[in-house]
Image: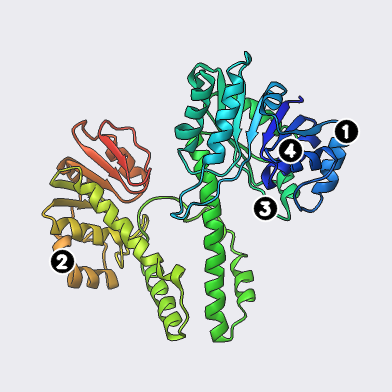
Amino acid sequence: MSTRLSVFGMGYVGCVSAACFAKEGHQVIGVDVNPTKVGIINGGHSPIVEEGIDELVGAMVGAGRLRATDSVTEAIEGSEVSLICVGTPSNKNGSLDLRYVERVSEQIGAVLAHKAAPHTVVIRSTVLPGTVEDLVVPALERSSGKRVADGEIHVCMNPEFLRESTSIKDFYDPPFTLIGGTSAEGVERVAALYAGIEAPLYRTDIKVAEMVKYICNCFHGLKVSFANEVGNVAKQLGVDSHQVMEIFCQDTKLNLSPYYLKPGFAFGGSCLPKDIRGAQFLARDLDVETPVLNSILPSNDRQVQLAAERILAKGNRRIGILGMSFKAGTDDLRESPMVTLIEHLIGRGMELAIYDRNVSKAQVMGANKEYIEGEIPHIWSLMRDDIDEVVAHGDTIVVAHKNREFEEALARTRPDQVIVDLVRIPFEGTADYDGLCW
């Protein structure tokens, strides 16, 4: 179904979006304050340099599905859905300059004040979480005299994932389409624009949509920097870094996968901390700076500190700990972040009881036994064999592992107890629940 669409900002994102949506059969009006850009588009050409865009703009203008104007009134009166694609450059302190987003929102709202039909306003510009709710919605309501909550204006966040030089291809082959909105009706209006695009469609909260765009870009930058640090170390060793990374990328079970990308508690064990320190030593020995690599362990330590702060903030001295090994399904206590956390809580005078079926006096042996007897005998005395005893002990209960036994035990908690969950375990009990970072 064809939609009458206006696109504000005929820069890179706006021009590509306008041309591609016109190709999808929608009637599109491009809007820009620069009359030169307006004239170029109406003349059948693109104001930006991008492979294939000049031909696409010319074809859509020739077909009568794309035109441009500098009149906000003309654009709003001639459309049902408006996309805001203006720039959001950085200020000197790293914050975003949102003057263009706010100005366009106010201009759109001023015209909507005299328009009876509900209108959908869509932010395509990259903005920080909270911008739509704290800046765009107030600007629209302030200038229109209408209320978003009443359904007079629908507001959505629909971030773009277009890379320069491959933007048209990216428009038609995105990783997914993401829409957050103030109303289901607005979200469905935007979703209809993508009816011809074969990609997963996610409907979500506005702040989630805003944040996904940001973390995608941050992760892309992280990957570039990580690969460059690998290359710099490999160069000094005489190793072919491209071959290293080509093989690295073949692992889609762990390396390039959702695995490990779950917000939660710190990592530990006998491998990751040791090998990260080893890689840091190698880089120092080669006199190669690796700021990304050097930030990993401090960030991991900070997650343990955050957990301790969250637990202590509950104000309870009696604490039950469910899980002590570095991860579920193992008895390995070497470099377990839970041991570090427990040590911290003991040092603050907390009264602890600990349960971990895999770490029991009857089963522990070898390196683990030596570690326990030599390094943490004081913690060993806090271990209990009965999970219900630990749950009953704790005014605050800390969950460190995901398993069915812990789920069942938490279902038996009391309303006066507090749960601090480090792993996002399913919870259906009556206690006060607090996730570490969710």
Mark 4 Cα within 10 Å, few/some/many (few <14, many 20+)? many
Mark 2 Cα within 10 Å, few/some/many (few <14, many 20+)? few
Label drawn at residue 377: 2
Q: Element type at marker 1?
A: loop
Which quarter of the rendered picture does the C terminus lie within?
A: top left
User: Looking at the picture, does residue 137 appear above or below residue 358?
Assistant: above
User: Looking at the picture, does residue 348 appear above or below residue 114?
Assistant: below
Which one is in front, 409 or 198? Answer: 198
Q: Mark 3: which amino acid?
A: Arg
Query: x, y (%) of residue 232?
Result: 54, 78
Q: Which residue is mark 4?
A: 18
Label drawn at residue 285: none
Query: x, y (%) of residue 145?
Result: 51, 18
Q: Which residue is mark 3?
A: 163
Q: Residue furthest front?
A: 35
Horizontal side, residue 375 vs residue 82: left or right: left
Which residue is found at the position 58% from the left and 23% from the top? 110
Mark 2 to mark 3: distance in Å? 56 Å
Q: Which residue is mark 1?
A: 63
Q: Element type at marker 2?
A: helix
